[in-house]
Amino acid sequence: MQKAIFIDGLWVEPRSGQTRRIINPATAETISEIGYGGRDEALAAAAAAHAAFEPWRQKTVYERAALLRMLADAIRSRQDDLAHILTMEVGKPLAESAGEIGAAADQFEWYAEEVKRSAGDVIPPRLANRRHLTIRHPVGPVAAITPWNFPVMLATRKMAPAMAAGCPVVVRPASQTPLALIEVFRLLETIGFEPGVANLVVGHPGECSQVFVEDDRIKKISFTGSLAVGRELYTACAERMKKITLELGGHSPFVILPDIPLDEAVECAVFAKYRNMGQVCISASRFYIPNAVKAEFEERVVAAVSKLKIGDGRDPDTSVGPLFEEKRVQASMELINDLKAKGGKVLYGGSPPEGEAYAKGYFFMPTVVTDISNDMKIMLEEPFAPIMPIIGYETVDEAIAMANDTPYGLAAYAMTRDLRFTVKLAEGLEAGIIGINDCAPSAAQCPFGGMKQSGVGREGWSQGLDAYYETKYVSIGI
C-alpha cells in the first residue's frame, strides 16, 4: 500500500486501514493501491496547519518566496516522470500531462515573485496629525479541494498563493487521481518547508469537507468542482461566515466570425474541444458558426477529427486518450441518445470505438453533432465530453445572445480579425475568461474564475493572492 496522507511533515497510514485502488483509464487496470483517510485525518491535518500558521506567517515574504521558487524548480526537474504518472492515472496524452506539470511549476514561480509586491498602502491623511496605512494579514489555514481532471495544476493553483501569503494548506485531491500530486508533496518534503505548512489528505470527500467547513481552525476553503457540491459548500460556509472561493465549471461558447478563414477556425476549434477529451472546465462546448459556411465548416471539422488518433496516452502518437472512467463513457452516450431522440444528427463518432485496442479502457470517439436544439441535455448541462455541437447563426448579435443563454459564465471563445468585433465580443460575452484567437487562455499570471453560476472569486494573477489576505486599516495619531 502506498502512503497518500501527509500530515505535519510525516507520511501516515489511515487510522481506519482503508485503501483505494487507482485505475489506469486506458486499460482499466489497477496501477496502485493507496491509503484512504477520512474525518480523523482531516482533523489531524487541520490541527497541523493551525499549529504551523504563526511561525509560517512570521517568515518574511523573501523566505517564503525562496522555498516556493525551489519547489517550482524541483517540479520542473521531474517534469517527464511526473507527466508519465499523470498520464497513467488520468489518461491524457503525455504532451498534455507535461504541459500540466509545467503549469503547476509556474504557479509556485509566479507567486514566489508576486508575493514580494503584495505590500499594503499608505493613504494620504486629511489631518496633519494623522497617518493612515493598510497591512495585509494572512487569513489563516486553508483547505483546498480539487477535482480529477487536472489534479496537479488545480491543487498548486490553490497551494501557491495560500503558502506565499503565509497560510498553511490542507489539500484534499480527488480520490481517483492522487499519484502525481503525492510526488509533488515528496518534493516539497525535501526542500525544507516546516511541518504543517502543506498537508495532503486523500480521503472520503464528504467526511473531509465536513471537517473543513465545521472546524474553526480552517479559515478558508477553496473548491474546484461541480455546481451542486459548490452550492452545498457555499451555503455551509455562509452559515459560519467562513471565506470561500469557488470554481464551478462552465458551458463555454465558441463563436467563429465570418472574417476568419475556415482552416484556422477548424484547427483552433478541434484543439479547444478535444483537449483532455473535453474534460476541461473551460473546454469549448458549443460552437456557433455563420450559416453561410456552416456546412463547409462541418465537413472540414469531420475531416480533421477523423485524423485524431485515439489510444493510450503513453503512446507519443496518441492525439486523444480515454475518458476518465466508465461513467464518463455512459454520460457521453446518454448525451448522444438524448440528442438523437430530439432530432439531432451525429456527423462523426457518437459511440465507443471498436477494436481490441479499446476493449478494456474507457474510450469514446471524438464526436461531431449538428441540428442542435436548446432543449437537448448537451445544451443544458456541462457536457465534460468529447462532443462538438455545431450551431448556425445569422448575425453577430444573435451569436452573442445565444452564447450568453446559459447559467454558466466561466469561459468563452471567439475568432475574428476585426477590431470592432473583438471589442464587441470582449464586452458582450458573459464569461470571466474570454479567449479571442486564443484557445488556451489559462496562465498563472492571469485571473481565472467565472461569472454567474460558474463561481465566486478569482484564482491566478494578483487577485489569487488577495483571496488569502485580510486587509487591516491602521490610523495613527502623531
Image (tube, rainbow, N blue to C red):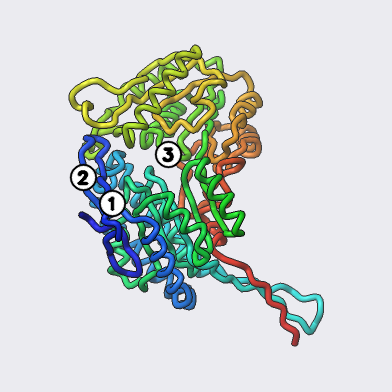
Name the element at disc 1. helix
N-terminal-most mark, 3 or 2: 2
Q: Which of the two marks, 3 or 2, is nearer to us in this view?
A: 2
Q: Quadrant of the C terminus?
A: bottom right
Name the element at disc 3. loop
Identify which residue, 19 or 435, lies in the foreground. Answer: 19
Q: Are marks 1 and 2 in contact (CB under 8 Å)?
A: yes
User: Residue flagged by tag 1: what amino acid is it?
Assistant: Leu
Residue density around tag 1, few if under 14, some if 14–19, many if 20 or more, within 10 Å: many
Identify which residue, 130 or 86, lies in the foreground. Answer: 86
The numbered mark at residue 179 is: 1
N-terminal-most mark, 3 or 1: 1
Which residue is at a point 31% across and 60% down the rendered structure image?
5
User: Residue flagged by tag 3: what amino acid is it?
Assistant: Val
Which residue is at a point 43% across and 71% down the rendered structure image?
64
Query: Is residue 307 placed above or below 281 in the rendered structure?
Result: above
How far apart are the two marked residues, 1 and 2, measured between alpha carbons?
10 Å
Residue lying at the far front in this picture: please name it. Answer: 16
Q: Is residue 137 visible?
A: yes
Residue 106 percent across, percent down from the top left: 40, 56
Query: Is residue 262 placed above or below 434 in the rendered structure?
Result: above
Q: Mark 2 = which residue?
A: 31
Residue density around tag 2, few if under 14, some if 14–19, many if 20 or more, within 10 Å: some
User: Residue flagged by tag 2: what amino acid is it?
Assistant: Ile
Q: Mark 3 = which residue?
A: 280
Q: Is residue 23 left or right of residue 440?
A: left
Residue 279 percent across, percent down from the top left: 40, 36
